[in-house]
Structure formats: structure tokens, C-alpha cells
Image (cartoon, helix red, strand yellow):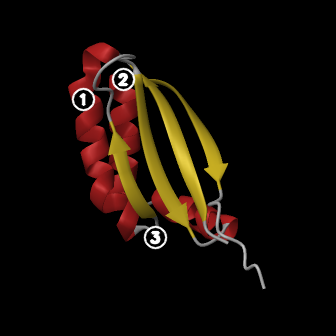
Amino acid sequence: MTITCCIRYSIDPFQRDVFADYARNWLTIIPACGGDLHGYWLPHEGTNDIALAMISFPSLAEYEAYRARLRPDEGGAANFRMAQEKRFILSKERTFLEPVVLEDAS
């Protein structure tokens, strides 16, 4: 069963452009480490401090394997370091979702 990890970021609205650079970096790193990246979304109108990312995996075990590959990855480590140094992410939450599918009626 496919699962999707939805990451909800609370960001510093005054560092929106820095978060955009951070998100752009993940666009190549995440797929290279095994995640099916659906994208990153920045606040546009309304709430100005919430950003989202969605990444799918064939299973929770595949997600765990991806996380194990991500931290030692050169690009991943650099992006995590940038976030820690610049402090533009105030908090983040992960929610794991499963798709609703049409059940076989036979």
C-alpha cells in the first residue's frame, strides 16, 4: 500500500525566499534517495507562514529506508545544515496518509 508523507512546515515569513531555495534543493535530492516527490508548496495568500511538501513511498518500510539514505547524502546533509544555520523553519509536522481507492464491488 502506498503511503504519502505530508510535511507541514511553519516557516519564518520573512525568510520565504530562503525556504524556497531549501525546497528547490530537495527537488533533486529526494527522488535520488528514493522518494516520489509530489512537490513543495509555499504560502501564496492567506496564512503566510505555512508551507507543505508531499512525498510518496510504496510502504512505511521504504520510507524508513529513504530516511536512512537521506541524512548521509551529500546534498541532503548540506540542505539540513542550511536549515539549521539559517533557522527559517520554526517547526514541522509529518502526517502519513493513505489513498482512498474505489473498492471492487464484485
Query: Label 2, on which residue?
Result: 88
Identify the secondary structure beneath mark 3: loop
- What residue did someone put label 1 on? 18
Position of residue 75 measured from the top left corner of the image (x, y, whole percent): 32, 55
Q: Secondary structure at mark 2?
A: loop
Q: Residue at x 54, y 46 (%)?
A: 6
Callout 3 amino acid: Gly
**Residue 86 visible in the snapshot:** yes
Tell me what residue is drawn at x 27 percent, y 49 percent: 25
Q: Is residue 86 left or right of residue 103?
A: left
Residue type at tag 2: Phe
Q: Residue at x 27, y 20 (%)?
A: 15
Is disc 1 placed on a helix, strand or loop?
Answer: helix
Q: Which residue is mark 3?
A: 34
Q: Where does the N terminus fall, quadrant-wise?
A: bottom right
Tell me the crowding category of disc 1: few under 14, some 14 to 19, or many 20 or more residues within 10 angstroms, Cα based. some
Q: Quadrant of residue 99?
A: bottom right
Q: Quadrant of the C terminus?
A: bottom right
Give the residue type that dot 1 points to. Val
